[in-house]
């Protein structure tokens, strides 16, 4: 039975792991911020972004998002780096020669991975959604082009009620070629069409311009009503047109679940973005355990070439892992796999690789 009581060796490895992890992360974040500033400085100046907003609304909220997105890379490189150095200095040999088993030596590594996984999960569930909301507001105001269009939008807003919009423009919150169909008992009961539907904040509804209402009556002549303006309130708000891959990142977990339920009811194809985001929030933290085991297994042996080969292999595997995680999302977009299967597939594959490497490492 393995003795799990903390010892000096555990604290030694734990401190090396966490210190190297956070120092590496801080250095990379500083470099990324410098490159990001150089890329966006022209837009900041052109749109007259205040310095305070740049620092506190954008970059302060950018840091947790970036930290979490690349945490698998940081974990793997950290483990590879300091474990390779311990192996090169013959510390691993001394540890194993002192009666500590290879499995027991892994305990402080896994304890560190637990802390990083909990930190990542906490960021995903509580911090990053709020931070993303502020960051995206800043980007929409000072960085991105606001004249964006969504086209061919279909929604089921309620039982038997379907909305179609040919195009929607963000700058004036207007839907063009608006159609609302009411279907009862598999028959078209009524149909409303309008040249435009503009969102009105005074009553949180839509103003239909040049509208045409046709009510279909069995055995009688259809009832037709036309007009220039009509105020209407339906189960569709302007925020529904802003739901995309970025906006789902701003939702708290409960809000994300509510959005998924609503979009599934409406038959909204954008539901895949919310489902991918939901799965990512849990699958990403789990990667800390897999990559820690892989890192230790690869770098605990002393090599003639020193740390170079370990770091090269570590970089190749970590980048392939992140690439596979992003590539697996394509299976969701094409409908080949469900979000749950696609987003956990990289973890499953690399968990098998980690298990094989771990089994071979003591030999």
Image (cartoon, grey):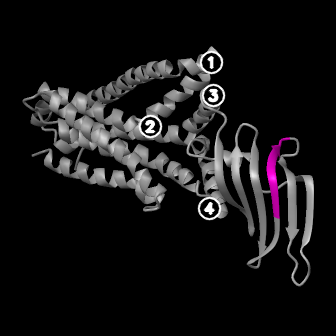
* 10 Å crowding of disc 2: few (<14), some (14-19), many (20+): some
> Comparing marks 2 and 4, which lies closer to the viewer?
4
Determine which residue is flagged by label 4.
Answer: 264
> Comparing marks 1 and 2, which lies closer to the viewer?
1
Task: Report the disc number at residue 24.
Answer: none
For residue 97: magenta?
Answer: no
Q: Earlier in the sequence, mark 4 or mark 3?
A: 3
Q: Position of residue 117 (x, y in %)?
A: 41, 41
Determine which residue is flagged by label 3.
Answer: 138
> Comparing marks 1 and 4, which lies closer to the viewer?
1
Q: Are marks 2 and 4 in contact (CB under 8 Å)?
A: no
Q: Nearer the viewer, residue 285 or 17?
A: 285
* 10 Å crowding of disc 3: few (<14), some (14-19), many (20+): some
Determine which residue is flagged by label 2.
Answer: 69
Q: Residue at x 38, y 20 (%)?
A: 27
Helix, strand or loop at label 1? It is helix
Q: Is residue 93 left or right of residue 183?
A: left
Determine which residue is flagged by label 1.
Answer: 46
Q: Nearer the viewer, residue 241 or 222?
A: 222
Q: For the magenta stretch, what is the residue range?
A: 192-201
């Amino acid at each position: 039975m393995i003795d799990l009581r903390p010892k000096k060796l555990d604290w030694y490895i734990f401190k090396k792991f966490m210190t190297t992890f956070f120092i590496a992360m801080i250095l990379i974040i500083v470099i990324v911020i410098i490159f990001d500033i150089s890329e966006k400085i022209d837009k900041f100046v052109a749109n007259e972004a205040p310095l305070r907003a740049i620092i506190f609304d954008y970059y302060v909220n950018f840091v947790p998002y970036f930290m979490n997105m690349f945490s698998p890379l940081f974990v793997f490189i950290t483990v590879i780096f300091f474990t390779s150095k311990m192996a090169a200095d013959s510390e691993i040999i001394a540890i194993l020669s002192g009666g500590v088993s290879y499995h027991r030596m892994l305990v402080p590594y896994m304890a560190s991975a637990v802390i990083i996984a909990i930190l990542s999960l906490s960021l995903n569930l509580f911090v990053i959604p709020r931070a993303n909301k502020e960051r995206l507001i800043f980007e929409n105001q000072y960085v991105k082009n606001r004249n964006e269009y969504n086209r061919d939008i279909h929604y089921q807003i309620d039982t038997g009620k379907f909305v179609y919009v040919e195009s929607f423009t963000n700058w004036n919150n207007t839907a063009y070629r608006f159609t609302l169909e009411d279907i009862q008992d598999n028959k078209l009961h009524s149909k409303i069409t309008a040249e435009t539907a503009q969102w009105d904040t005074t009553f949180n509804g839509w103003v239909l311009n040049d509208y045409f209402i046709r009510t279909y009556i069995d055995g009688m002549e259809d009832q037709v009503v036309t007009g220039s303006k009509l105020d209407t309130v339906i189960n569709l708000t302007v925020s529904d047109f802003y739901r995309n891959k970025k906006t789902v990142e701003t939702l708290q977990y409960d809000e994300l679940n509510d959005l998924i339920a609503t979009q599934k009811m409406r038959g909204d194809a954008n539901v895949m973005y919310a489902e991918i985001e939901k799965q990512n929030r849990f699958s990403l933290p789990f990667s800390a355990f897999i990559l820690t085991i892989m890192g230790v297994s690869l770098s605990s042996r002393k090599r003639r070439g020193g740390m170079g080969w370990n770091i090269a292999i570590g970089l190749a595997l970590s980048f392939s892992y992140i690439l596979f995680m992003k590539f697996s999302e394509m299976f969701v977009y094409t409908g080949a796999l469900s979000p749950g299967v696609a987003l956990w597939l990289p973890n499953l594959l690399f968990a098998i690789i980690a298990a094989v490497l771990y089994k071979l490492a003591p030999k």
